[in-house]
Amino acid sequence: MSKQEDIDWSHLPFDYHKTDYNVRCSFDGEKWGDIVVTDSENINLHMAAACLHYGQEIFEGQKAFRGKDGKVRLFRIEENCKRIQDSARGLMMEPIPTDKFIEMAERVVKLNARFIPPYGTGSSLYLRPLEIGVSPRVGVRASSEYLMVIFATPVGSYFPEGFNTTKVVIYREYDRAAPCGTGRWKVGGNYAGGLRATERAKSHGYSAALFLDPKEKKYLDECGPANFFIIEGDRYITPKSNSILPSITNISLQQIARDMGLKVECRPVPVEELAKADEAAECGTAAVASPISEVYDSDNDVHYVISKDGKPGPVVTELYHRLQAIQRGEAPDPYGWLREIDV
Ligand code: PLP
Ligand code: COI
């Protein structure tokens, strides 16, 4: 293995950093081919490719961590695999076979081992799998050929604030997805659809827009880049809706919350229930568990102040530390969430 890259590991942004290799696999209309390793950062595409015109693009995000014991582990990669297969079915794309996806993920970690941040820096190696429809299409129909790519990039905190509170904002004039649309799949178009809200939120100092259920605008859905949960007394409450991306971090935190003796409720959460929240957070692979101090309902000019002193609450803090401890091999992995990679 070549020597560890010379990077300021503790101050990495959540952004693209060039690594050595990425891995690719193509579906030719009948079968998936062999995994190809390349150092090219570019994809050669037909200008009429279905992904460019009709949005057949899905992706994933997961992390590999270097543990306290020096070992490298991927977190719940099988869940990401199931989700990208589900996203593929949702967009009439070809689901990649499980063994192929997992082999690609393992190989990209091994091939870029010198970019896996050291233990204790708070950073990790983020994997970004993506699948696109590549057949030339002018009439609207599904592609018959597909390309799956997984690249890796070392990342730090998603929010520059790190593990500190941020504020989020509700704007009823934007949705990220339609009520029976693509919100439950990890589709690039959902993020494009949410960008106007996201950019507006950021320009006003919020970390994200908090979207409502697009049908009735009565219930909380999720944030632009992450799921949302609140803590009310001894309850972990997270929204249930057809337009939310099922977050692997959220289901993991729910399990940890149960282990901490909390009750877990996954149900429609009316906006006004924010007034009862003791704590709130955004959660996701990139966001981990990012505490929220205030939700501003801009349409009704209501400030739901969740943390009066602006500090993260005790339950979110414990959830965050417990999850990180499992991911970094500091605590046991009782549910088999980690896959050790021999780098
Ligand atoms: N919701 C959205 C819209 C996301 O982009 C993400 C990130 O992947 C999540 C939720 C969190 O999902 P996960 O915890 O699986 O990363
Ligand atoms: C992730 O958390 O992995 C995501 O894909 C969210 C993205 C907006 C960075």
Image: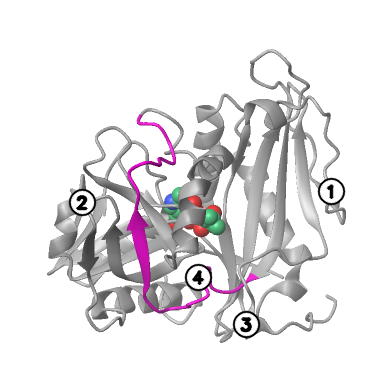
CA neighbours of label 1 inside 10 A, class few (<14), some (14 to 19), many (20+): few
First-in-chain label (3 vs 4): 3
First-in-chain label (1 vs 3): 3
Q: Is residue 6 above or below residue 343?
A: below
Q: Is residue 45 above or below residue 309?
A: above
Mark 3 CB near ligand 2 (8 Å cut): no
* Label 2 vs label 3, nearer the camera: 2
Asked if the residues shown at circle 4 and circle 1 are in contact, with their CB atoms under 8 angstroms apart, the answer is: no
Q: Residue 290 location, x and y as percent?
A: 39, 70
Q: Tell me which amino acid carries mark 1.
A: Asn
User: Which residue position holds label 3?
Assistant: 11
User: Which residue position holds label 4?
Assistant: 159
CA neighbours of label 3 inside 10 A, class few (<14), some (14 to 19), many (20+): some
Please name the predominant secondary structure of the magenta segment in the image.
Answer: loop
Secondary structure under badge 2? Answer: helix
In this rendering, position of residue 72 left or right of residue 227: right
First-in-chain label (2 vs 4): 4
Find out whether residue 88 is within the magenta segment. no
C-alpha separation, residue under disc 2 versus residue under disc 3: 36 Å
Identify the colour scheme used. Answer: one colour
C-alpha separation, residue under disc 1 versus residue under disc 3: 27 Å
User: Which residue position holds label 2?
Assistant: 271
C-alpha separation, residue under disc 3 versus residue under disc 4: 12 Å
Q: Tell me which amino acid carries mark 2.
A: Val
Q: Tell me which amino acid carries mark 4.
A: Phe
Q: Quarter-wise, where is residue 135 in the image? A: top right
Q: Which residues are magenta?
A: 155-179
First-in-chain label (2 vs 3): 3
Mark 1 CB near ligand 2 (8 Å cut): no
In this rendering, position of residue 226 left or right of residue 239: right
Secondary structure under badge 1? Answer: loop
Q: Residue 298 location, x and y as percent?
A: 30, 55
